[in-house]
Image (cartoon, rainbow, N blue to C red):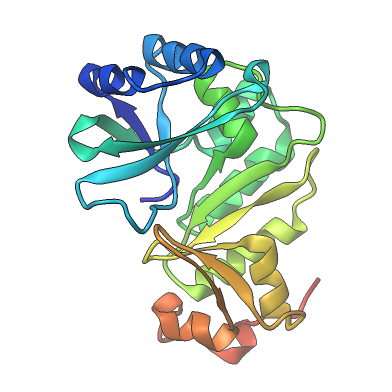
Amino acid sequence: MRNQLVWLDPAAWAQIELREWDEQAQAILAHWRTQRLPLVVCRQRPQTSKDQVCVGLPAPQQWSRRRLALNLDLNGLAARDHFPTLLQVAQANQWGRAARSLSDSLSDLGLQARVYGSHGWQWLTGLTYVHDASDLDLSVSVNSLAQATAVVKRLARTSFHCRIDGEIVFPQGQAIAWRELRELLLGNTVQVLVKDSHTLRLATLPDVIRMGYSTPEFQPDMVLTCS
């Protein structure tokens, strides 16, 4: 699944390091291997075989935020997990009441926000990713369009020390940037970009509903009416 963290076994690392890399890439890969750090599943290329997976390694500032892309055999994956929760990252950074309030309000909906992007990778690696202009990238998986609407409203009301960005992930794994979804629900735009494991495509609100994102209880008045 896209944005899932994966850890590699020693044989997979050995195969990767046999490939031709420049000096900087070699240093990044050596650090990742010795520190047993994860990579992240990205969008899969059309030519990727069923027994392989496309993953990415976003390096921190010390390596100029370089991004490495890799194709790996699935049998080389030793473990899988998720990015840290908002609460975990908030506690590590001693963020105040706003982060805990947001985490609690999502928990009341039966949901959990996970932190990817710069803040997520800094928490995972202990390396410097975050800078003054860094957004807080949140991923919230929902079961319905009704839940997605509630999440969007809550995020729009949250005042935080940095800009909250990120996406809503629907049951089939398709993701929509929460700010774009808000504009669609408000009627300010007619299309949003939908991402999944293999494709990017545009969708209208009827498309979103037809794609099975809504529950049978979805009604037109669920569309946002507040700013």
In the depicted view, which residue is nearer to us: 205 or 112? 205
Residue 140 horizontal/vertical position (percent): 52, 54
Residue 137 horizontal/vertical position (percent): 63, 44
In the image, taking residue 99 as reference, residue 201 lies left or right, namely: left
Residue at left offset 76%, top offset 58%: 157
Outermost residue toward the front?
A: 20
Q: Residue 74 occupies which quadrant of the picture? A: top left
Residue at left offset 38%, top offset 65%: 171
Say how many tags the image has. Answer: 0
Outermost residue toward the top?
A: 34
In the image, is residue 157 above or below residue 40?
A: below
Q: Is residue 224 visible?
A: no
In the image, taking residue 70 as reference, residue 146 lies left or right, namely: right
In which quadrant is the C terminus drawn? bottom right
Residue at left offset 30%, top offset 20%: 13
In the image, taking residue 214 as reference, residue 225 lies left or right, namely: right
In the image, taking residue 104 as reference, residue 39 lies left or right, namely: left
Q: Residue 76 occupies which quadrant of the picture? A: top left
Q: Is residue 136 visible?
A: yes
Q: Residue 172 occupies which quadrant of the picture? A: bottom left
In the image, is residue 57 above or below residue 29?
A: below
Residue at left offset 30%, top offset 51%: 48
Residue 170 horizontal/vertical position (percent): 45, 65
Residue 43 horizontal/vertical position (percent): 44, 52
